[in-house]
Amino acid sequence: MPTNYALRTPLFAKASSTVTNTASAECVITVGGVTVYTIVKPAVQNVNVIFEVAELLRDYLFVGFTFYPQKITFTTTIQFFDLPNAQGTAQATPVNTISGDGYEAYTEFTDGANSVMPFGDRARPSWLLAPIHPNLPSTLNDDYYIYVPIGKGGTLCWIDYVGNVSIDSYSGTDVTIQPASGIPLNIVRIDCSRYGDGNQVSFINKYGVMQDLWFSLKEVKSINRSNERFQSNTLDNNATYAEVYAPIKLLNTQAKQSYSLSSGYYPEGANQYFEQLLLSEYVWITRPRINAPTLYETIPVTVKSSSFRYKTSLNDRLVEYTIEFEDAFDYINNIR
């Protein structure tokens, strides 16, 4: 039975020793059964020694463009010694403090310390995305909705009773899917025909798994150039110069493309999707190839917008967002 932890949030391993002459503590961190870090701290009797391990574990978590769960399996053990710097005699057996699976997930302040994904009481198999109409845990009837263009399929992650994360796919005609004994997912079909097929934005959400968010209305594309300039000498040996040679030269000319995407109309409960997109550090756009529009390519992007205002049906009538994205690479290939 795995325990799932969020590695974008501090994760604390702690233990204390009851032995009188305790002088130091050693924390050993393993990933995939291999020791990757050994940390030593001073320690005293009956006082917790605390190690923050999330940032260290995250170094070993590779995140790519895939809907399969991306995680690491880790352990942390703490051993006490009677001399400083983990020297002398080891006291009793090491204490296995926290262990489990680590994800590119995060918790919020109100979730508390060392929260376990999905950070709430879900007693039935459920989807690893924010519920549109969250109910009290005792009702077990969170409403899960996604909004997908007509004819498009996709993949989502869900979590079972004991913490195992799996994937399930839906076709271009499905309007609902449901894991065994789990909470159904409702698929609302949207019409993107006015602006083509819409724009598919994929991102790692709060729960550390991939989620799609479709932008069905207008797209505005732009390109921003940057370069350096210097003044060159164009005089020849006769102290003359040709007017066709520019004395001002450009150097390191580069560019980035950016995109302004309009989401189309979403219900108020979908505000959480856009919030998690804004906070994600891994985002991709799937788009038609410029030189072959019938083929698609997936590119990494960053969310250029730094804030957004939560919209409500009461204040705004219709909930629609326009978000700025920028390529996470230079337009001119400079990978060496």
Image (cartoon, rainbow, N blue to C red):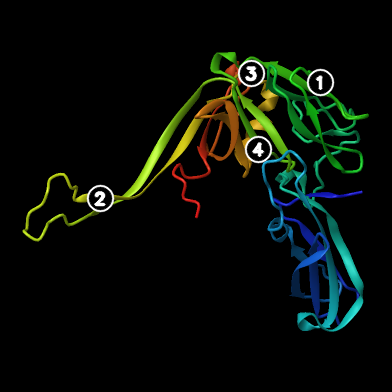
Q: Which label's residue is closer to the chain start, 3 or 2?
A: 2
Between 262 and 308, the one nearer to me in the picture: 262
Q: Which residue is drawn at the image coordinates 62% and 18% (left, top)? A: 265
Determine contact: label 4, label 1, CB under 8 Å.
Answer: no
- Disc 2 residue type (three-letter): Lys
Helix, strand or loop at mark 3: helix
Up-down: is 205 above or below 51? Answer: above
Give, as a three-letter code, the residue at label 3.
Ser
Q: Amino acid at mark 1?
A: Thr
| Relative image position of residue 314 (x, y in whole percent) | 63, 18
Which callout, 3 or 1, points to the residue nearer the camera? 1
Q: Mark 3 vs mark 1: which is more N-terminal?
A: 1
Q: Earlier in the sequence, mark 1 or mark 2?
A: 1
Gap in Å between the C-alphas at discs 4 and 1?
Answer: 22 Å
Q: Amino acid at mark 4?
A: Phe
Which of the two discs, 2 and 4, labels the residue nearer the N terminus? Answer: 4
Q: Secondary structure at mark 4?
A: strand
> Pointer 2: what residue?
249
Tell me what residue is drawn at x 80 percent, y 74 percent: 25
Residue 304 can be seen in this image: no
In the depicted view, which residue is nearer to us: 133 or 62?
62
Looking at the rendered structure, the secondary structure element under dot 1 is strand
Percent position (x, y) of residue 253?
A: 36, 47
